[in-house]
Image (cartoon, grey):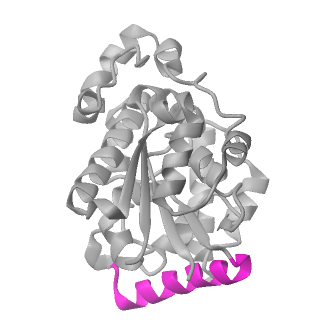
Amino acid sequence: MTQKVIIIGAPRSGTNMLRDTLTSFPGVATWPCDEINYIWRHGNLRYPSDEFPADLATPKVVNYIGRRFDDIARVTAAKALIEKTCANSLRVDFVDRVVEDARYIYIRRSGIDVVASAQIRWKAPVDIPYLYKKSRFVPLSDLPFYAWRYLGHQLHRLTSAERRLGAWGPQINGMSDLLARHSLLQVCAIQWQRCVDAADQAFEKMPTEKYLELSYEEFVRSPVDQLENVLQFLNIASDRQQLESATKNINAESVGKGSAQLGSATVEDLLPFLGAPLDRYGYGINNNQ
């Protein structure tokens, strides 16, 4: 049977890095696109945010998503199937009810660095190849909804004073109101805080043998050792040469980059919006720890 592994993490927290590193090993595969939020939301298309309560995992939803996992597992013949959708950090209980036999890798990163990186993505130009790869996994019945929403987001970019998308990343409760009342940087901070808090609360209730928690900062500073721990958790065999090859392009250059980009005054202003997780995990303003 294929082992199902779900990476949980707020946007810009190293989730792509972790997925791509793991799938460089034989027998480890993933979807041929970045995220499958279209699949996770099928059956709950019009729910106003990505903060799904667990009871939205109806038998119909569980069956549909389960079949999509089985399809990819069959096509790839994977021994371990990696899934990474950042919005899942807001709904771990829902995900765990849908994929009951899943194991999780929870990666977290300083909210200061995340905010600096996330604001760039809110203003990034359209990446057509990226969009095409994801669109292949939109359920046909949901296509009209997403097409109109995509057009709305692009029109917002043209008319917005901040030249930003109408929405980006995990959709938290009250997102429209937050965007109307706060700066983009503040919304990025709140978005990170909600993702981390929701994931923390879910994993506190989960048996410890089902998940492994990682620090982005520790991973990029000691990638070989950290990756070895992850592979041991997943019961995937590796040797030193494979570990070094898989991590050869990983470095710690981005650690603390957010503080440098934003400046100390801006970071100080953001601290109230970053909330308790910043203190809980010991992320200081300089973030060089």
Q: Residue furthest right?
A: 129
Residue 114's place in the image compared with 49, above or below, is: above
| Residue 49 visible in the snapshot | no
| Image location of residue 29, percent across then percent down | 67, 66
Residue 107 figure quarter? top left
- Which residue occupies 55% across, 86% down? 67
Report the front residue among 161 and 230: 230
Residue 197's place in the image compared with 26, above or below, is: above
Q: Main secondary structure of the magenta part?
A: helix
- Which residue occupies 49% across, 77% down? 42
Report the front residue among 68 and 248: 248
| Residue 231 visible in the snapshot | yes
Question: Which part of the image, by quadrant, shows the C terminus?
Answer: top left
| Image location of residue 17, percent across then percent down | 61, 44
Report the front residue among 196 and 247: 247
Q: Is residue 190 left or right of residue 26?
A: left
Residue 102's place in the image compared with 244, above or below, is: below
Per the rendered image, the range of residues in magenta is 57-77
Query: Residue 168 lies in magenta, yes or no?
Result: no
| Image location of residue 125, percent across then percent down | 70, 40
Residue 108 figure quarter? top left
Q: Is residue 64 left or right of residue 25?
A: left
Q: Residue furthest front?
A: 239
Tally of numbered tags:
0
Q: Is residue 9 left or right of residue 151?
A: left
| Image location of residue 182, percent across then percent down | 34, 32
Question: Which part of the image, by quadrant, shows the N terminus?
Answer: bottom right
